[in-house]
Amino acid sequence: SGKEIRLHDIFKTTLHTILIFSPETPDAEKQIDAVIKTVQSLPENTAQVVILGRHGVPKARDGTVGYHDTQGYAYGAYYAEEDKVTVVAVRPDTYIGAFVFEADDLKSYSSLIFRNL
């Protein structure tokens, strides 16, 4: 919508926030879809997905929201590379629970948090 927002306004005290830093690379869409599929396998109402693009608003998928990191603040704060899908799982207490690059690594982290996976 063009409205500025801070990540701390997006974080919820009742949900894990999965930040996906979306590069403009040929294989990014496939990797992002795999991460979203992993998040969708989590127990209902436990996580939200935020896709961040550095050079524009990324394509949002069903159940996700997309934001343009116009100034690169989020990319800088989380040391996300502009040419690599980076996934950061932020716990409800706003601490980083995982910093990964693959859907399988997010699944491994999630299995520790949600033991029934």
Image (cartoon, rainbow, N blue to C red):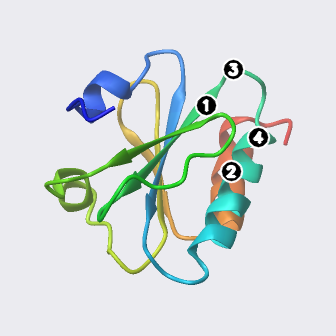
The Cα–Cα distance between marks 2 and 4, rounded to whole angstroms, is: 6 Å
Contact, CB < 8 Å: mark 2 with mark 3?
no
- Name which residue lies at 18% across and 61% down: 76
Query: Which x, y percent locates residue 112?
Result: 69, 45
> What amino acid type should be assigned to the residue bearing mark 4?
Gln
The Cα–Cα distance between marks 3 and 4, rounded to whole angstroms, is: 10 Å
Contact, CB < 8 Å: mark 2 with mark 4?
yes
- Residue annotated with mark 1: 47
- Residue annotated with mark 3: 45
- Mark 1 burial class by Cα count in 10 Å: few <14, some 14-19, many 20+: many
**What is the quadrant of residue 96 in the picture?**
top left
Instruction: Say above or below: 43 vs 97.
Output: above
Query: Which x, y percent locates residue 114?
Result: 73, 35
**Viewport quadrant of the N terminus:** top left
- Residue annotated with mark 2: 36
The Cα–Cα distance between marks 1 and 2, rounded to whole angstroms, is: 11 Å
Helix, strand or loop for disc 2? helix
Question: Which label's residue is closer to the chain start, 2 or 3?
Answer: 2
Query: Which x, y percent locates residue 37?
Result: 76, 51
